[in-house]
């Protein structure tokens, strides 16, 4: 009997060879891809950069619009030229407002500095009696003195100094102004020797000197 080749053996040789011939070209086609044109890549990159630039520019316009005073009241969307024009108009307005605020600040600072200077003035100034002298007639004067109540003990010394100067005390009165201050009113008749060109000023300076010499400002 003639022996026939095994069917498995024939299928393995023939089919394996056919399979290897048919599968190789398909593998070649699937593993390769057409090359990308360099101009296309360049164009895509340019478009991407342009989109980013436009986004940043749009954000800048939105930020600028938010700074303009009329933007929130406007219902219409502003175009870029409108925003630029409004910004150019708004800048001088801001400069004027800044100038006014600066002047106001300087004025307020000057007031504060003046008040600080007054606050730093030695308390001796506030303790010195206030003295005014007014002429009634050529030989008559009225002296008004305002001082702290605890300093009133020097008033008797003042009266003695006035009499020592040869002036005659016509009337004398006392008035309480507030809790810590008291005012004295003196009506004096002056002798001829006490009169001079500036006798009012001279008399006032004498009264202030008499009072200050007998006041203990440290107490």
Image (spheres, helix red, strand yellow):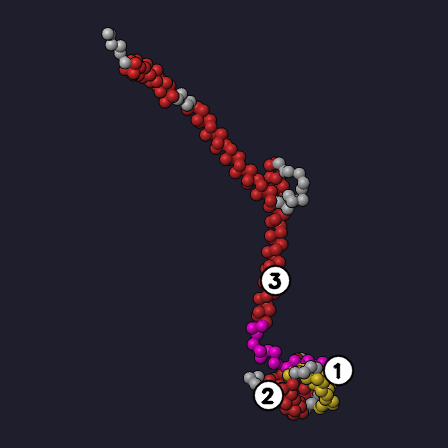
- Residue at screen point 62% across, 50% down: 96
Identify the secondary structure beneath mark 3: helix
Please say if the residues under marks 1 and 2 sit with CB atoms less than 8 Å apart. no
> Does 88 sit above or below residue 49?
below
In this rendering, the answer to whether 64 lies above or below 208 is above
The reply to whether residue 48 is visible in this rendering is yes
Report the Cα–Cα distance between label 1 and label 2: 28 Å
Question: From what the image shows, is residue 48 above or below residue 133?
Answer: above
Q: Which numbered disc flags the more N-terminal residue, 3 or 1?
A: 3
N-terminal of the pair, mark 1 or mark 2, is 1
Does residue 188 sit above or below 107 in this rendering? below
Label 2, label 3: how far apart the Cα atoms are: 41 Å
Q: What percent of the width, then of the height, locates residue 210?
A: 62, 86
**As drawn, which residue projects farthest toward the top?**
1
Q: Is residue 20 toward the left or the right of residue 160 in the image?
A: left
Packing grade of label 1 (10 A; few <14, some 14-19, many >=20) is few
Which of label 2 and label 3 is nearer to you? 3
Q: Which residue is mark 3?
A: 108
Picture coordinates of residue 6, whole percent (x, y): 27, 14
Image quadrant in which you'd find residue 12: top left
Asked if the stretch drawn in magenta spans residue 134, the answer is yes
Which residue carries the number 1 mark?
136
Residue 192: % across, % down: 70, 87
What residue is shown at x 67% (from left), y 83% (from top)?
179
Which secondary structure lies at badge 2? Answer: loop
Residue at the extreme right of the image, as rendered? 137
* Left/right of residue 137 with respect to residue 32 in the rendered view: right
Of the residues under marks 2 and 3, which one precedes in the sequence? 3
Q: Check disc 2 and report the residue beneath it.
A: 214
């Amino acid at each position: 009997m003639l022996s026939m080749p095994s069917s498995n053996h024939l299928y393995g040789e023939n089919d394996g060879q056919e399979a290897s011939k048919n599968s190789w070209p398909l593998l070649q086609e699937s593993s390769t891809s057409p090359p990308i044109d360099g101009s296309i890549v360049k164009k895509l990159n340019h478009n991407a950069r342009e989109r980013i630039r436009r986004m940043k520019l749009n954000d800048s316009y939105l930020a600028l619009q938010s700074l303009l005073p009329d933007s929130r009241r406007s219902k219409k969307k502003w175009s870029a030229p409108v925003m630029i024009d409004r910004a150019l108009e708004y800048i001088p307005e801001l400069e004027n407002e800044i100038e006014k605020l600066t002047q106001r600040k300087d004025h307020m600072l000057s007031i504060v500095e003046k008040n600080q200077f007054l606050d730093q003035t030695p308390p001796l100034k506030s303790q010195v009696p206030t003295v005014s002298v007014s002429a009634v007639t050529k030989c008559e004067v009225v002296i008004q003195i305002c001082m702290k109540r605890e300093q009133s003990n020097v008033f008797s010394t003042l009266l003695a100094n006035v009499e020592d100067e040869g002036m005659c005390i016509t009337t004398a009165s006392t008035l309480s102004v507030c809790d810590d201050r008291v005012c004295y009113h003196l009506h004096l008749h002056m002798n001829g020797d006490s009169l001079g060109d500036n006798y009012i000023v001279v008399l006032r300076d004498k009264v202030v000197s008499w009072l200050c010499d007998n006041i203990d400002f440290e107490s």
